[in-house]
Amino acid sequence: MDYSHETLELAEMIAETCTGCKRCMKDCLFLQRYCEDPQELFQRFLSEGLEPIIPYSCMLCGRCAVVCPLQLKLDDAFLSIRRDMIKEGLPLKQLKSVELHQKLSTSKLFTAVNEGK
């Protein structure tokens, strides 16, 4: 997949700059589920890519940037990855769009709604 200059720049900055302090992971179930730390996740993205569900599982809340001592904006990187996936033709049906996002989301708000239906 061809990623935009913006996406690659954001990913490289996080992969090279993140210190692995894990402050962003303390309250983020998404990061806890998909990585050891953001540096590892973005190094993996740059070397082998990510399953589409990973960038779509981020709630884009921005809490990571608030607690990060370097103010790394992981949410901006995940949004940029999403945009590139759509531009490359990733069909939202493959992800079942918002429905799949809500069912697989690490957000208690969404995962608790309509369980068992």
Image: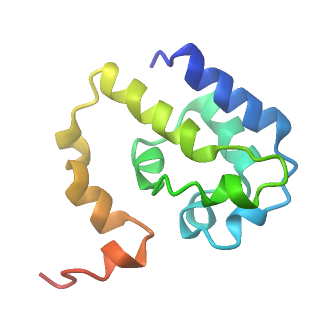
Q: Position of residue 26 (x, y in %)?
A: 70, 72
Q: Residue at x 17, y 85 (%)?
A: 116
**Looking at the picture, does residue 45 appear above or below residue 58?**
above
101 lies above or below 12: below
Residue 27's place in the image compared with 117, above or below, is: above
**Which part of the image, by quadrant, shows the C terminus?**
bottom left
- Picture quadrant of residue 111: bottom left
Q: Quadrant of the N terminus?
A: top left
Q: Is residue 32 left or right of residue 96?
A: right
Residue placed furthest toward the front: 66
Between 66 and 20, which is closer to the camera in this rendering?
Answer: 66
Coloring scheme used: rainbow
- x and y percentages locating residue 51 in the rendered image: 45, 42
- Locate residue 73: give its quadrant: top right
Task: Give the answer, above or below, for where 25 lies relative to 10.
Answer: below
Question: Where in the figure is residue 94, as x and y percent of width and height?
Answer: 22, 41
How many badges with numbers are in the image?
0
- Residue 31 is left or right of residue 58, and the answer is right
Q: Position of residue 63 (x, y in %)?
A: 62, 60
| x 73%, y 44%: residue | 72
Q: Residue furthest left?
A: 117
Q: Is 86 situated left or right of 91 in this image?
A: right
Left or right of 9 on screen, residue 30: left
Q: Residue at x 35, y 65 (%)?
A: 104
